Image (cartoon, rainbow, N blue to C red):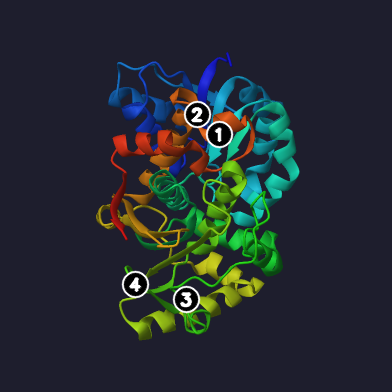
Amino acid sequence: MSRGYELVLLGATGHTGKLAAEHLTKHAPTNLRWALAGRSESKLNSLASDLRALHPDCIQPVVELFELEGPSLTSLIKRTQVIVSTVGPFMKYGTPVIEACARNVTHYVDCSAEIPWHKEMIERFDTIAKASGAIIIPQTGSGSAPPDLTTYLLAAHIRNTYSAGTLQVTSSSELKVQPSAGSMDAVLSEFDIYGSSQMAKCREPFALSPVQHRPLVRPPHLSSWTRLIGVGNDEYLGPLTDFEQSAIDKPLVERSWGLLNDGGLYGPNFQYDELKPARRIWSAFTGHVGETILMYALSLAPVRWLLRRYSPVAQKDDAEAVKQEFYHNTAVAIADTPNRERAIAKSGFDGSIYLFTGICITEAALTLLRGEETYATKMGGGFLTSATLGHAYIGRLRNVGVRFEIVDDVS
């Protein structure tokens, strides 16, 4: 694909966009042909000047102005190989970008976390993207790419080691982050636009999978009381409880199951669950009840209005708080074999979670541009996932400080 740019970063002057631009400046190949895109010429020029000071010896990004509606967007998309978008909430601003990429054979990655919108985009544009050859990968940010990749790593390890599928992956995640106003707006907008019923449909098992899954069997870490009280137990991970991110990550992992050899890589009986450590049963139970009440409250328009008006979410980073941010994950996979062998993987990142997102989305784009052949490139187009970028993507992330490792095999 011969185009003027290899990569265009949309929303470059936003919080995540700036961090993504800084990462590209420091870590992308020095001959990368790329552009910073947004609506404010003065802000873009200021950012470009700051980036030049960071790495004066590399090819400097070009400044491009565009609007989300109209010919300037299509013109820009036709002139690049990959779009990296940080312009959210994506359900408000992302659809024209997705459509233009799907129709114009331009690959796309973003940091969305909006499952109902993701589902809608698949239904509207997957066939178009497959026909054109555009690879569209939403949800490559720090919230969704790591669990998707960790699950892939475990399933591939079990397939290679035991020549078998994976019966179950149980993921235990810990996340410490200072939420942004943009993240809060995305959560509230999801309820505004899609409502509770549409969101509930996206939580049905394998809702995003292109392949139908057989009826599920209850995983070993769940008892009949688990869903009621919000506490489960795993032999290796210990007590577990609800993880807020699970409703976003689980449909994505299940889509990866269906995309990779029509479920063949992970195996026909694969299941995924994502929880977090429960240090005290009582606090886990009260947290479970609190989250249930919160989800109901968010379904009420007056509550969302109050949150928008009086939200305590910080508008700017607290530098000291950002230093304490982290994402840590331990996942246990059970092989679909008579002996039920287990493999354990760890992944994580210490530091700004929004920087982590900037790293994830830009390295996904660079994998498409400069990486080796992947499942994604073999598929040739359509709505894919981080897992379809496989070991090539994991390797790039490892090279810039993100941890992914198989730490143990337990018979």
Of the residues shown, which amino acid type is indicated by label 2? Leu
* Alpha carbon distance from label 1 to label 2: 8 Å
As helix, strand or loop, the secondary structure at mark 1 comes to helix
* Alpha carbon distance from label 4 to label 3: 11 Å
Which of the marked residues, 4 or 2, is nearer the chain's N terminus? 4
Which of the marked residues, 3 or 1, is nearer the chain's N terminus? 3
Query: Are the residues tagged 1 and 2 within 8 Å (C-beta)?
Result: yes
Q: Nearer the viewer, mark 3 or mark 1?
A: 3
Query: Are the residues tagged 4 and 2 within 8 Å (C-beta)?
Result: no
Which residue is labeled 2 in the image? 368
Q: Residue 4 or 181: which is nearer the viewer?
A: 4
Which of the marked residues, 3 or 2, is nearer the chain's N terminus? 3
Residue 206 image point, x, y percent: 62, 58
| Disc 4: CA contacts within 10 A as few (<14), some (14-19) or many (>=20) | few
As helix, strand or loop, the secondary structure at mark 2 comes to helix
Give the quadrant of residue 213. Answer: bottom right
| Disc 1: CA contacts within 10 A as few (<14), some (14-19) or many (>=20) | many
Identify the residue at horizontal 69%, vertical 66% (top origin): 195
Q: Which quadrant holds the N terminus?
A: top right
| Disc 3: CA contacts within 10 A as few (<14), some (14-19) or many (>=20) | some
Q: Which quadrant holds the C terminus?
A: bottom left
Which residue is labeled 4 in the image? 235
Q: Residue 350 or 77: which is nearer the viewer?
A: 350
Q: Which mark is residue 376?
A: 1
- Residue 77 visible somewhere in the drawing: yes
Which residue is labeled 3 in the image? 222
